[in-house]
Amino acid sequence: MPQITPLFVTPLYRGRLSEHEPAIDTEELESSCYAIYEDDEAGQNWCEEHGYPGYTSYASLTDLPWRFPIFTDLVKSLDAHVADFATKLQLDLDGRDLILEDIWINILPEGGFHSAHIHPHSVISGTTYVAMPEGASAIKFEDPRHAMMMAAPPRRKDADEALRQFVYARPVVGDVLLWESWLRHEVPMNEADGERISVSFNYRWE
Ligand SMILES: [Fe+2]
């Protein structure tokens, strides 16, 4: 029997916030996201000027974990998830740590989307999900080898997930998704009536 061995795999981590201390009340996190949004005029203006559909605190607030205790707690939990993922990735951190670089809020209304991108200057990136109304967008990951496909045929629609060139993950509230920061991803158009709220973050090697 010939053997097929998966090489150069692209691990996607999916955990639950509740797996690590401290406990995060996702309803409180949701109301905090709205309160921060309402106070963040600079962020609202940035989104309007840049045609950003919805709200992100990315360009305006760099200190969520210092200003808001629920974000302090959230980062403690995320630190544990990221450390766990780094172990599973078998990274040789050479005695150094992966530490939070940025963390920001995304509020995506109906019709909002976030086009494909990577997260430079980071090792691990991820998102935790705060509000996912019925029909809220998945997150779409893209095979990092696309540039090398050249004249190759696409995979069949029913191909095994590990062989697909695009994978849609459908997280629920309280999920934590992590991936290596070079992995290109996008949020397709949000077709839910309600707002899709997530908190994204980057970890760097220090
Ligand atoms: Fe992203």
Image (spheres, rainbow, N blue to C red):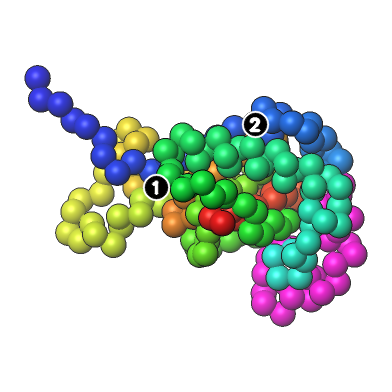
Mark 1 belongs to which amino acid? Phe
- Displayed quadrant of residue 70: top right
Residue 198 placed where, x, y %? 69, 49
Horizontal placement of 1 versus 81: left or right? left
- Displayed quadrant of residue 188: bottom right
Residue at 67% over, 27% down? 19
Q: Is the magenta stretch mostly helix, strand or loop?
A: helix
User: Who is closer to the viewer here, 120 or 83?
Assistant: 83
Quadrant location, the N terminus: top left
**Marks 1/2: CA–CA distance:** 23 Å
Q: Does the magenta stretch include residue 34?
A: yes
Residue at 69% over, 30% down? 20
Q: Is residue 74 above or below residue 62?
A: above
Q: What stretch is highlighted in magenta?
A: 30-56
Horizontal placement of 75 versus 97: left or right? right
Quadrant location, the C terminus: bottom right
Residue at 43% over, 43% down? 91
Residue 97 placed where, x, y %? 57, 48
- Displayed quadrant of residue 110: bottom right
Residue 102 placed where, x, y %? 66, 59
Residue at 24% over, 59% down? 148
Most extreme residue toward the bottom, as rendered? 49
Q: How crowded is mark 2: few (under 14 residues within 10 Å), some or many (20 or more)?
A: some
Q: How crowded is mark 1: few (under 14 residues within 10 Å), some or many (20 or more)?
A: some
Of circles 1 and 2, the one toward us is 2
Q: Name the residue under label 1.
A: 166
Q: Name the residue under label 2.
A: 16
User: Who is closer to the viewer here, 186 or 95?
Assistant: 95
